[in-house]
């Protein structure tokens, strides 16, 4: 890695950069002409900021997964509790959901996806160990904890016991009560330090497979979110694959419009693709998105020209 963050030829530790989820492998070594993997978002929630209420019924969810897989998604991230933050953009934030309600939403969908699409990696977006364990037993392959083990560090024990990859994201507060902005003296180093603590907890529990996510849009200003993208290589230095979730978020809307009048959610695709390309060039190897086909196409051309 050069000082500017440009990726150079490097030997990656396959034990860390080739994920294995219950027999399925995913090569997450970044750069050198490899195509980053696309994770399609499937929110089985009534109140997510972009697609809440669209996929609550199992048949609608399966139809959406079928489309995402056909468009090139390698992973599908199933979430049963919105993480929409409170603040001026999204209002009071998402309502808290019990573990039982979250399982009621998520488990039938996970089981159906595992049966219908046996080749796709299924990620469960939850910070509750009980939900994660049940989802893995229902056919999921990856746990995506957007609290980075802050609320339930025992999530690491679930991932270790079930031998599945664990995604740890930087955030503040609890889902639905996460602050929209927070003061950082140096957002990149603060996020890296927090992720290092998540890694420490996970490694102490003997989790063998980790992915880090800097938490674009969670408790950061527009300027700070853009810094995270341009400094993605800093998180790669933590020694594990990096995931970015940029899709349609308010920072994209603010850049395309303004903080006071952000571009509508439906008009944020091209801005999302631009930020995604920067993050991948800086080392991200998994991209979480609502818009699978445009992201897949962009990443193919990016890999062919770098």
Image: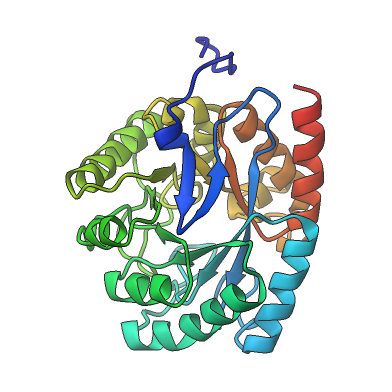
Query: In the image, 56: left or right of 35?
Result: left
Residue 219 appears anywhere in the view: yes
For the point 55% across and 13% down, which residue is it?
Answer: 4
Which sits in the foreground, 256 or 60? 60
For the point 28% across and 34% down, which residue is it?
Answer: 193
Residue 31 location, x and y as percent?
Answer: 62, 26
Image quadrant in which the C terminus is located: top right
Q: How many marks?
A: 0
Whether 8 is drawn above or below 85: the answer is above
Residue 260 location, x and y as percent?
Answer: 62, 54
Whether 195 is drawn above or below 118: the answer is above
Query: In the image, 176: left or right of 284?
Result: left
Residue 32 location, x and y as percent?
Answer: 66, 22
Which sits in the foreground, 82 or 29? 29
For the point 53% across and 76% down, which residue is it?
Answer: 110
Residue 303 location, x and y as percent?
Answer: 75, 30
Residue 267 appears anywhere in the view: no
Quarter of the view holding residue 237: top left
For the point 32% across and 52% down, which residue is it?
Answer: 148
Which sits in the foreground, 26 or 277? 26
Whether 234 is drawn above or below 183: the answer is above
Whether 267 is drawn above or below 128: the answer is above
Residue lying furthest top: 3
Quarter of the view holding residue 64: bottom right
Residue lying furthest front: 23
């Amino acid at each position: 890695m050069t000082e500017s963050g440009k990726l150079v030829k490097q030997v990656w530790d396959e034990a860390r950069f080739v994920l294995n989820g219950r027999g399925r492998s995913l090569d997450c070594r970044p750069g050198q002409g490899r195509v980053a993997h696309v994770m399609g978002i499937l929110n089985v929630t009534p109140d997510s900021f972009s697609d809440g209420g669209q996929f609550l019924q199992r048949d609608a969810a399966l139809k959406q997964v079928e489309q995402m897989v056909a468009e090139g998604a390698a992973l599908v991230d199933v979430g049963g509790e919105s993480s929409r933050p409170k603040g001026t953009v999204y209002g009071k934030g998402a309502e808290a959901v019990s573990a039982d309600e979250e399982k009621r939403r998520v488990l039938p969908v996970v089981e159906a996806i595992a049966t219908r699409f046996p080749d796709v990696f299924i990620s469960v977006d939850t910070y509750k160990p009980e939900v994660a364990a049940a989802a893995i037993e229902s056919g999921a392959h990856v746990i995506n904890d957007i609290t980075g083990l802050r609320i339930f560090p025992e999530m690491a024990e679930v991932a270790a016991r079930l031998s599945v990859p664990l995604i740890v994201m930087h955030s503040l507060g609890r889902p639905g009560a996460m602050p929209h902005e927070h003061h950082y003296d140096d957002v990149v180093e603060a996020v890296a330090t927090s992720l290092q603590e998540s890694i420490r907890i996970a490694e102490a529990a003997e989790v063998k497979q980790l992915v880090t996510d800097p938490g674009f849009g969670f408790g950061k200003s527009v300027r700070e979110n853009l810094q995270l993208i341009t400094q993605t290589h800093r998180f790669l230095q933590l020694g594990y694959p990096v995931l970015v979730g940029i899709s349609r978020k308010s920072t994209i809307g603010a850049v395309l419009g303004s903080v006071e009048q952000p571009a509508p959610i439906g008009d944020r695709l091209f801005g999302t693709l631009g930020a995604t390309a920067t993050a991948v060039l800086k080392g991200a190897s998994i991209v979480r998105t609502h818009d699978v086909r445009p992201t897949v196409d962009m990443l193919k051309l990016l890999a062919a020209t770098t």
